[in-house]
Image: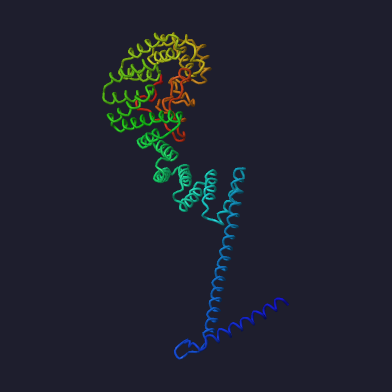
Amino acid sequence: MFKLLITIFLISAGVFIYSYFRELNPGTVVVHTGPGAEFELSPVTLVLISMAFGAVLATLVVGLQQTAHLILNWRSNRLVRRKEKVDTLHRDGTHAFMSKRTIEAITLLEKALAIDPNRVDSLLWLGNIYRSEQNYPEAIRLHQHAQRVDDRNIEVLLELGKDLEEAKRYEEALQTLQKILKIEPDNLTALIRKRNLNIRMERWSDALEIQHRLLKANLPTPEKQSEAALLVGCMYEVGRQLLERGHPDKARRYFRGAIKKDRSFLPAYIGMGEILLHEGKTKEAVEILKKVYSRTRSVIILHRLEELYLDQGEPSEIIRVYQEALQQDPQNPVLQFYLGKLYYRLEMVDESFDLLSTIEGPQDHLLDYHKIMANLYLRKQHFEEAIVELKKALSFKKRVIVPYICTQCQQESVEWSGRCRRCAKWNTLTALPWLEAGQAATSSTIEPDSVRTVPYQGIASPFETV
């Protein structure tokens, strides 16, 4: 009832006001709506019509704004719900993978990507899972998609590089790492992996250049020491390649640089000797190796001298070198063993037997010792003793090879090289394990896959005895 009274009152007031203003504003206004079309309105009526039109227009504008706002809210809520669903699938997928439920993880992450194909973290995770399953083509496809979505994402590029490397597509992996370094020139992870790839591909000059950059980085002291040792190894390998390619002068510079950084780095000393031999300066090579032996007391140097003297037809000289070494260390069973082995190699049966039959040590570690002793007993016609030694050796061959052994991983090799083929460390091959097993490693390692031995020609088997 109250509302009805209010309505009647407002209508009455409106009619009164309209009549009042119409009396105050007599006359008419002609409004033209087109050619030949016109009509007359009082001024008050024109004002009221204008006000009504404005109110309708304002209402329409506000209505459109409200409608647009409702649509945007609906779309926003839809995107939020979609994102929440994708987040849930992604989270469940990662949890499933960490719980070793790989198939379930792949299914969940694929569902997440079906909803949002450009979600980078889902692409990363699914690609990493496929790589762990050695499905490299799929891992590469997913990580390349992630790269197209975000081409400056360092994590994506690192994972893509890892895919390509494990798929043995090394050139493409190097190109990917180079993209990272264009974005972030001092990225240590990319530098280290690029260096390791160059080492794997034996691009030692490129590896050495990167190694110099790494040493200029702000690394912790233990890591810097390890990288410095690796720098020495890379310098040696560059020199070795140059020598093999017929550039002894350039090789000498790298060998000297390696020696300057590590006075105990035997491969570089042997490399210097090889340069002198390449130049026909055999005596100078012998003198350098003798000086190195006096400084390092490494049996490896004695073996190299043995080969040089025997090649020159001067066995008495190497015998004298061994004897002088034994005079300085008369209780050294390793030196005794190798001098006895040299006697055996030179057919000096009595001298070899007298020396080898009295030493202690090698027979406990080396089956080839028993091969030598069995052959010596046979030559002396001590058949029972020979049989005993042959049983210890399990089998006998007239040609005896005493292997080099890596002090780090115990890998045996009949060829000396500056770098172990298994653990990829430099300067670790020793003559007999009990001589230098306690020496600390001075070289850094990389991934040991596909590391091959790289001996110099002419010193492949210094332990052979005939």
How far across and how far down the image is residue 279, in percent? 26, 25
Q: Is residue 248 left or right of residue 237?
A: left
In this view, the residue in front, 374 or 89, is 89
Which residue sits at x=37%, y=22%? 263
How is this picture coloured?
rainbow
Residue 247 visible in image: yes
Quadrant where the N terminus lies? Answer: bottom right
Q: How many marks?
A: 0
Residue that lies at the very extreme toward the front in this rendered image: 24
In this view, the residue in front, 376 or 316, is 316
Residue that lies at the very extreme toward the bottom in this rendered image: 36
How far across and how far down the image is residue 355, in percent? 44, 9
Above or below, 405 relative to 22 = above
Quadrant where the C terminus lies? Answer: top left
Residue that lies at the very extreme toward the left in this rendered image: 280
* Residue 205: quarter of image: top left
Above or below, 86 relative to 214 = below
Residue 466 visible in image: no
* Residue 326: quarter of image: top left
How far across and how far down the image is residue 361, in percent? 49, 14
Q: Is residue 394 left or right of residue 152?
A: right
Above or below, 62 relative to 322 = below
How far across and how far down the image is residue 104, in percent? 61, 48
